[in-house]
Image (cartoon, rainbow, N blue to C red):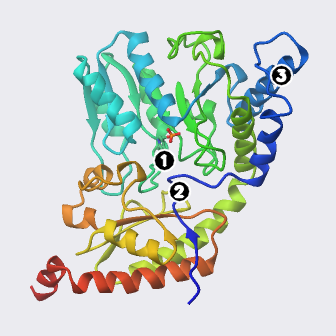
Amino acid sequence: MDKRYIYADNAATTRVSDSVMSAMMPWFQDNFANPSGLYSPATASAKAIRQARADIAKCLGAEPGEVFFTSCGTEADNWAIKAAVELTGKKRIITSRLEHHAVLKTCEYLRTKGYEITYLPCPENGIIEPGDLEKAIGNDVAVVSIMLANNEIGTIQKVSEMSEICHEYGVLMHTDAVQAVGNIPVDFKALGVDMLSLSGHKIHAPKGIGALLVRKGINLPSFIHGGKQEAGKRAGTENVPYIMGLRQAIIDATSSIEKRSEYVLGLRERLIDGLLGIEMTRLNGSRENRLSGNANISFYGIEGESLALLLDMKGICVSSGSACTTGDTEPSHVLKAIGLTNEWAKGALRISLSEDNTASDVDYIVEMIAEIVGKLRESSTLWKRTINS
Ligand SMILES: *Cc1c(COP(=O)(O)O)cnc(C)c1O
């Protein structure tokens, strides 16, 4: 059989699209001027950034002055949380164990500096109850940080309800929307959050560009000190090509959500049905309330890592747990948070589809997984013990 190449790890990163490449190209060589200059190529660069800020704001229900470019989603998360505690002077942060490490490790760092971290309970469906936030919140809280869509299990949180609760208590609300922007409709104003993180490379822009949206009127402390870029809050010469790439990616993604998600959802349902046909498997996280491209399935009695490595030999790129924790022998913190036992959590595989995938990709993935899971189970003592008991 011909060796195929199927990329199905779009929650880890995506291919830069042709339209994003074209949008970036003129800003590398034709006009490379520093936007802070006085000559006309420089003012053209500055104008391009203004246009990008305005267009991104428009796509996401924000105002241009609310958009601050960063080097990535991780930076936006770090900035939001560290600046919120500095701004408010309060000592408690509320978050959940479903968050990305960009949020979790920032909170753990702040804990070593004397801050208290409250983790909201995570039900098995991977969707946090706003009522649990209501119970945990108080006016001693600096910031609540709950992601809009999860990167491992794709579940979508009730962020606007949580924002309302935060505002009753005068608490800042941050959401990591890196997986959500471009995949589900995101309206900054309607969500009611004070801060929102996004990243380019999950939506066909390059790695190394992101943004933090900050509600007008919040005077968030600066994150990087230096020049006057980003209203003096995030210094460093602007990455004009990547900002233009991010603009194009957000325009493309937000204008086609409905069409794309219908197509990708069809593929995903076919994939989930196929994989749940293998005995002793489970879908992790709510089937309904999740990103259309995300399938996270556990195969009992095997290691997701071994499965992913053997799939690579068949030309299939998928992830065990989250890409950021590859190499860890510990099972995914998200799967543990929703209550999976070690055995089920270790057998997890995340397949994240995009509009570039086809039904034939899905059928090939299911066929290969069924074959490899069967082989791995033949040599698994855990599996033998289970089926013989
Ligand atoms: C990828 C991701 C990040 C990190 O974004 P980078 O741009 O890679 O730093 C943060 N949060 C979530 C939910 C992500 O999926």
Secondary-structure class at tag 3: helix
Secondary-structure class at tag 2: loop
Quote the CA–CA distance across marks 1 and 3. Answer: 33 Å
Q: Residue at x 23, y 54 (%)?
A: 330
Q: Residue at x 26, y 31 (%)?
A: 118
Q: Amino acid at mark 3?
A: Lys
Q: Tell me: 46 left or right of 318.
A: right
Q: Please tell me which of labels 3 and 2 falls first in the chain.
A: 3
Secondary-structure class at tag 1: loop
Q: Tell me: 134 left or right of 48.
A: left
Residue 256 location, x and y as percent?
73, 54
Q: Which residue is mark 2?
A: 291
Which residue is more in the foreground, 268 or 207? Answer: 207
Q: Residue at x 24, y 56 (%)?
A: 329
Quote the CA–CA distance across marks 1 and 2. Answer: 7 Å
In this view, 29 is above or below 381: above
Q: Which residue is mark 1?
A: 149
Disc 3 Cβ-to-ligand 1 distance below 8 Å: no
Residue 177 location, x and y as percent?
53, 40
Mark 1 crowdedness (10 Å alpha carbons): few <14, some 14-19, many ≥20: many
- Residue 91's tag is none
Q: Which residue is mark 3?
A: 47
Q: Amino acid at mark 1?
A: Ala
